[in-house]
Amino acid sequence: MSNKHNNYIIFDEYKTNRPGAWYFVPDEGVFVKGVPCHGFGAVKYVEGSVYVGELYYDGEKFNKIGNGQQDFCRSTLGRKSIHSGLRHSKYVGAFDYRKTDWIFGNGVMYFVDENGEPQYFIKGFFSGFDKIGEWQGEFDYATLLSDYTRDMELAAEPVDFAVDWVRECVAPWRDKHADVLFVGDSYFELGNVADYAGVNLFGKVFPQGYVNIGVGGSKFSDWLNWIDGASGMASPKKIVLNLGFNDIHSNMEPATVYKDYTEMVEKLRKCFGSPEIYLVQVVHSPKYAEMYKEECDFNNMTASTASTLGVKLIDWNDKIVASKQDCFHFDRLHPNEHGYALFEQAIKEAL
């Protein structure tokens, strides 16, 4: 249900504070379901963040493109950063769903402490949460959010806390061997979030002897630095890697990602001796359908050297196709409840 008011529409999700499109104002004419158009509106996401800004309605979904702002104050994305120990508060700037899942272009990322007090901001050219370049053009400091001043600017997010965060996560396993160590990205991190995994939570599926240190948006290159924090734990019997997805979709060459992968395998053996190492191959999500070739190129590289490197591969792409179900969240990027059931099944079968 929804209510139309002249040329704009308010959706029931707004009234009930549920995820989904909240309101939309077309640039021209009136909103007609199924008819693509550009406009301005608001969308709430399952993890709790709210976007307000330009949107392109493709006849089915509302996609972020152009200028806008996304508030993370009530989102799991606004949790304490493992980099700085602070919280992401809001991003204001450019979005382009055609380039990334969301953020892409000039923008400003704002941070607050645990009490919500403004701490600092970073301006630059962003791809997701990552600053990948400097601000293009001249920046007007008069556009900063209220309570943020020029002297609160940092060039990049501090990384001092990342290794400490990992060390804290594995602290209970200093003197006893974990059965499985999960090292990966948001697919692991959201495995214990009911809004994504539903009843198929990792904590219910996997034994108590597993340790999950998944971090959304992370790449092999991140973990080459962070894994040192886990080196003090008793060597796990098995390690499962779910990395490469963000690397490939950050427009890194498959060969470069493969190099980081082999370095990661080498580093894991230096840190932990000789655990069994498993790699989940990059999944083909609907969000990045146009990057199927790059995903396959990387997967083929890892497959061709798996036996040489002593790595066992986990490929659940065939399970997704065979299920004939929609296995992805409405963001078309992460697994939904059905997807997590298949993801966990593939991992359990391999282990």
Image (cartoon, rainbow, N blue to C red):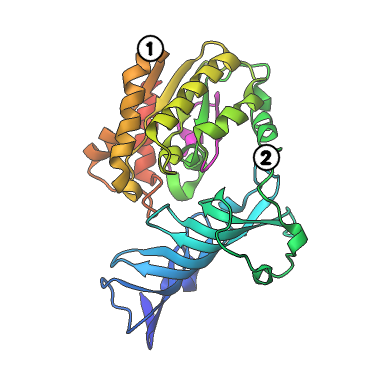
Q: Secondary structure at mark 1?
A: helix
On residue 308, the disc is 1
Density class for disc 2 (Cα within 10 Å; few <14, some 14-19, many ≥20) is some
Q: Which residues are magenta?
A: 198-217
Q: Are marks 1 and 2 in contact (CB under 8 Å)?
A: no
Who is closer to the viewer here, 128 or 255? 255
Asked if residue 309 is positioned above or below residue 151 in the image, the reply reads above
Who is closer to the viewer here, 243 or 326? 243
Within the magenta stretch, is there residue 32? no
Within the magenta stretch, is there residue 208? yes
Residue at image coords 51%, 51%: 128
Point out the image quarter for the C terminus.
Answer: top left
Amino acid type of disc 2? Val
* Residue of label 2: 159
Point out the image quarter for the N terminus.
Answer: bottom left
Residue 121 lies in what quarter of the image?
A: bottom right
Density class for disc 1 (Cα within 10 Å; few <14, some 14-19, many ≥20) is few
In the rendered image, is residue 162 in sight? yes
Residue at image coords 33%, 36%: 295
Question: N-terminal of the two: label 1 or label 2?
Answer: 2
Rendered location of residue 144, percent (x, y): 67, 67
Who is closer to the viewer here, 12 or 154? 154
Rendered location of residue 340, percent (x, y): 39, 40
